[in-house]
Image (cartoon, rainbow, N blue to C red):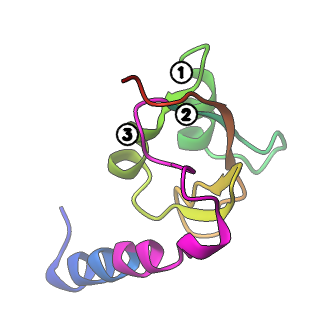
Amino acid sequence: MLNALEAVQAVEAVQKAQKRIDRTQYPESTTFFSKLDRWLYYAVSDTKVCDLCRFFEEQQPADGYPGDWLRGNFPYLEILDVDEIAANVHPNCRCALKRVINLPEEE
């Protein structure tokens, strides 16, 4: 369970991550957190990879995680570019999510 300081730090980190998204650098139609966006999790494959990062890679659906699932499970994520997100599962995390599919919205 989080203490008060950890809870405040977690909220501040999420707010900071949300501010990192500069919508002007992506086409207006670009989405990251739509249920139609699909992301594959890539854990760094070396002796330092943690069990949680290995779990996210091994348990992901074959077509990747849906975009609307990311924020709840990767609260400290950082959008690096239109096709890559730093997962930031824990401090010094080196793992990433890479875009697989960005389907147009159904009409």
Mark nearer the N terminus (3 vs 2): 2
Judge depth for marks 1 and 3 and give the one in front. 3
Give the tally of numbered discs. Answer: 3
Q: Which residue is mark 3?
A: 68
Q: Residues within 10 Å of mark 3 (few under 14, many from 20)?
A: some
Q: Residue 97 appears in which quarter of the rendering?
A: top right
Depth check, front residue: 2 or 83: 83
Establish if 18 lies above or below 1: below
Q: Residue 55 appears in which quarter of the rendering?
A: top right
Mark 1–mark 2 contact, CB under 8 Å? Answer: yes
Q: Is residue 36 left or right of residue 87?
A: left
Question: Which residue appears at 53% of the width and 41% of the height?
Answer: 52
Q: Residues within 10 Å of mark 2 (few under 14, many from 20)?
A: some
Question: Which residue appears at 42% of the width and 40% of the height?
Answer: 34
Q: Is residue 7 left or right of residue 71?
A: left
Q: Amino acid at mark 1?
A: Gln
- The N terminus lies in which quarter of the figure? bottom left
Question: Which residue appears at 58% of the width and 54% of the height?
Answer: 87
Horizontal and vertical percent for residue 40?
65, 32
Mark nearer the N terminus (1 vs 3): 1
* Residue 87, magenta (yes or no): no
Marker disc for residue 107: none
Q: Which residue is mark 2?
A: 56
Q: Amino acid at mark 2?
A: Phe
* Cα gap from disc 3 to disc 2, whole angstroms: 16 Å
Question: Which residue appears at 68% of the width and 55% of the height?
Answer: 82
Main SS of residues in magenta: loop
Horizontal and vertical percent for residue 68?
37, 39
Judge depth for marks 3 and 2 and give the one in front. 3
- Stretch of the chain drawn in magenta: 14-36
Establish if 105 lies above or below 82: above
Q: Which residue is mark 1?
A: 59
